[in-house]
Amino acid sequence: MEKFVNTIIKFRWFIAIIIPLITFFMASSLKNLEFEGSYRIWFGKESKILKDYDHFRAIFGNDDAVTIMFSDEDGIFTKEALETVENITQKLWETHYIARVDSITNYQYVHNDEEYPDEVIVEDFIEEPQHYTEEELAKKRAIAIQEDMIVGRIISKDAKTTMIVGRMTPKAGDDPEVSFKLRDAVLEILAPEEKAHGYKFFLGGGPIINTSFIEVAQHDGAVFTPSVIAIAMLLLLLIFRKFSSMFMSIIVVIFTFLIVLSIQVLLGFKLNNFTANVPVFVVAIGIADAMHLLWIYTMARKKGMENHRAIHYSVQKNFLAIFLTSVTTAIGFASLGISAVVPIQTLGIATASAALLAFILTILFVPAALAIVNPKIKADKDVQEADNHPVAVWYTHFLQRNAKLILTTAMSIFIVLGLGIFQAKVDSNTVKYFKESFPFRVAVNEMQEKLTGPMSYEIIVDSKKNDGIKDPKFLNTVEKFYKEFYATYPDARHVSSLMDVVKTFNKVLNGSKTVPQDQELIAQYLLLYSLSLPQGMEINDKMDIDERLLRVSASMNLVETSKDLEMIAWIEDWWKKTPYSAVVNGQTVMFAHMQHDVTATLIESITLAVISISLVMLLIFRNWRMLPLFIVPNVLPIALVVGVMGWLHIDIDMGVAIAGAIIIGVAVDDTIHFMVKYIEARKRGDNLENAMKYVMSYAGSAIIFTTIVLSLAFLVFVFSDFNPNYHFGIVTASALIIAVIVDLVALPALLILIDDRKKSLLE
């Protein structure tokens, strides 16, 4: 170690120059940094969920759309409102990437010819609304609110709210650039209508979700990284009261995240809502290493050591501890690499490499910079006997007197809070990823309140034979499914399929809104309907080419993912009891199935992190009896936080899932610094009391200060509009605070009780 430090001091100028040069050279690639927000990034290329969805789209076309909703308190059946709908509808038809537009004006209305009752007419429901009289508009309204195919889908029951749906061309939603172009085109269409009529438009659909994901990631990356750096700089100045110490700590983490991001760009990765936060994680991780190194260095200088000797002293005291903390932190993040959720994988791997890189840069750059700068730190008589600092002495005696009470109280609190784990629920609903105040979330809530369910499910029913969807028995089963589905799930707002067209034709021609019992007649109805439709409004997105598969579309209210999965299972089980079968597909279903991946990420990553960290601790200290002292204090914080979430009925999302392993990896740092100092003191012959004084003097303050910096760094995420980031910030900061309480209160109390029974834990 002495040779290692001497080498750093000898080549201090080379190290101090080459590291910034390498960093800035690599950082030049950041000009190519891109963001990605497509729904596809959440799934691997070999994901069965993604393959099933692609197969569905290959048969039925794109289910992705941009939706435009607005309300009029006077009702939408006014000339002003209908002209607005017609204008938007026509302009959307002319918009690139839009394959089909559905609205109240171009709804294909099936009815009798008034002059020739035996003739069926299929036509746009409203054409040139400016020419309609008040009486004609009232008549149209009366007809519309009786049309099952549009009420609860594109108009509300009270006819005060309407929606225009622009269905996208195949694979248009896969490209984030297309999402931005389409959103901007829609906003350009709406601008004159908003100015002329004052309507407030609410946008939804795939392009809006994609652009929302990207814009939130860009905002968080642009705001949180400088905010965390500023907070860290301020705290470091307050702690060290030296600009040089602050600068050395900050510059290391800046070098680290610039290099890590550069590597990501060079490897072809794009930033997403999680990896955009890598710089914040790096700041939190890297500063902890630098702080411990500078803290001991400062104490050594205050004890009267000259510069080079203080550098030797600090590196020797900290090398093992910060090496272990870097390894365990890297393990915590790397354990996320097993997640099936791709952005979590990339976050874990990127940040794990950052943790190790931060250690290398800290252990090389900080000592080299100290050797060059040689900060002026005067010797302080009060620090000469730091092992007997009055606060450390008082606190050690306090722990010795109250060890049993502390442990009993702590265990009681842990048990009560921990039981809340059984109340915790996992929710991976994409809409709930955004805060209630976010524009997209506002639009979704508005849609649910005034019009229809914002969550779409595509139920693909297999009739088991070609032309089977025309079989009266099959369509009667579909109708039965409608009724039982509505009865079982009150959150179902609208269900539609070609069966509705068949019933409408039968009502118009035979006066009975039922499924006819003649397959040939059903075939004629569907043929007549398809031949009457204008170009672009075909029915080939409602069935497959062999007319074996029927697409049933259901709109549901926003519910918990567990209820989504329950509903999906119910639908598929219901059809298994018939001669037919069904599968549920669509983007909503894809993200619902992610719940399993989120739960697996939480459980498997924590398990992997605990096992891996345990093995590292066992290899280093070679004492299996010490493992619980390293692991239990760091599993407890995440267990307690999740328990509190369970009691408060706060759902676990991806933010909490990734927090688990990260908390263990970061929180164990405090335990390592505590135990390394404790073991060092006991091995040199100190009794329990003196060992505790030594630990509290040399590790206690540094642990508290690093926890404050880390907690504040993670707390900036509470200002994110992305709920997984918000929950990650709250959970991680809370767990780190709990961890430091466990490490500096419960753990010492436990060591004191163990020492009463055995001469030394180390024997």
Image (cartoon, rainbow, N blue to C red):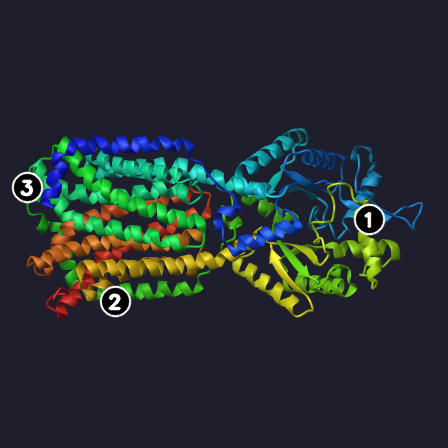
Closer-to-camera residue (397/759): 759
| Quarter the C terminus occupies | bottom left
In the rendered image, the vertical position of residue 272 relative to residue 375, given as above or below: below
Which residue bears the numbered disc 1?
110
As helix, strand or loop, the secondary structure at mark 1 comes to: strand
Whether residue 311 appears in this view of the structure is no
Instruction: Give the total number of marks visible in the rendering.
Output: 3
C-alpha span from label 3 to label 1:
95 Å
x, y percent for residue 233:
27, 36
x, y percent for residue 66:
62, 41
Q: Residues within 10 Å of mark 3 (few under 14, many from 20)?
A: few
x, y percent for residue 372:
14, 31
C-alpha span from label 2 to label 1:
75 Å
Which residue bears the numbered disc 3?
381
Which residue bears the numbered disc 2?
408
Q: Are marks 3 and 1 in contact (CB under 8 Å)?
A: no
**What residue is rendered at 65% in x and 47% in y?**
61
As helix, strand or loop, the secondary structure at mark 2 comes to: helix
As helix, strand or loop, the secondary structure at mark 3 comes to: helix
Closer-to-camera residue (731/380): 731
Name the kind of residue labelled 2 in the image: Thr
Name the kind of residue labelled 1 in the image: Val
* Quadrant of the rendered image containing residue 99: top right
